[in-house]
Image: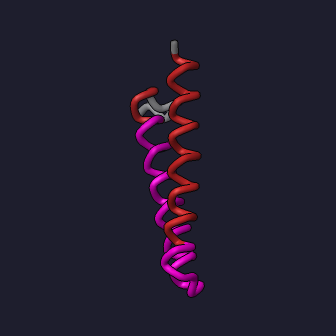
C-alpha cells in the first residue's frame, strides 16, 4: 500500500477535522471551567471570526 503524502483533498479534510475537534475541545473546556453563557458566546464568536479570516486568507492565496 502506498504510504506517501495524502492527496490535497484528503489533507484538507483532515485539517478541517482537526480544526473542528480543537473548536469542540475549546468549547468543552470553557463550559467545564464554569464561565457564564455570555463569556462562552464571546469566545465562540472570536474563534469563528478567526476561522473566517483564515478561510479568507486561504481563498485569496489559492487565486
Question: Which residue is at the far top?
Answer: 63
Magenta span covers which residues?
Answer: 12-39
Tell me where residue 45 appears, x and y as whole percent: 51, 57
Q: For this rendering, which residue is in front, 22 or 51?
A: 51
The furthest residue to the bottom = 34
Q: Quick one: 51 or 11, which is closer to the camera? A: 51
Q: Is residue 56 above or below residue 46?
A: above
Depth check: 39 or 29 in front?
39
Residue 15 in magenta stretch = yes
> What residue sits 50% from the left and 43% below the top?
15
Residue 48, percent from left and from top: 50, 51
Q: Quadrant of residue 16?
A: top left
Percent coordinates x, y for residue 1 in the rendering: 40, 34
Number of marks in the image?
0
x and y percentages locating residue 8 in the rendered image: 45, 27
Looking at the image, what colour scheme do you see? secondary structure
Please tell me whether residue 11 is drawn above or below residue 40 in the rendered image: above
> Residue at left 52%, top 74%?
38
Identify which residue is drawn at 41% across, 40% down: 13
Q: Is residue 37 magenta?
A: yes
By secondary structure, the bulk of the magenta-drawn segment is best described as: helix
Of all residues, the one furthest to the front in this rendering is 38
The residue positioned 53% from the left and 60% from the top of the image is 22
9 and 41: which one is in front? 41
- Vertical comparison of 48 with 3: above or below: below
Amino acid at each position: 500500500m502506498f504510504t506517501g503524502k495524502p492527496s490535497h483533498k484528503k489533507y484538507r479534510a483532515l485539517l478541517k477535522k482537526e480544526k473542528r475537534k480543537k473548536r469542540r475541545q475549546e468549547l468543552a473546556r470553557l463550559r467545564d471551567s464554569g464561565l457564564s453563557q455570555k463569556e462562552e458566546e464571546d469566545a465562540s464568536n472570536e474563534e469563528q471570526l478567526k476561522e473566517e479570516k483564515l478561510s479568507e486568507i486561504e481563498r485569496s492565496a489559492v487565486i
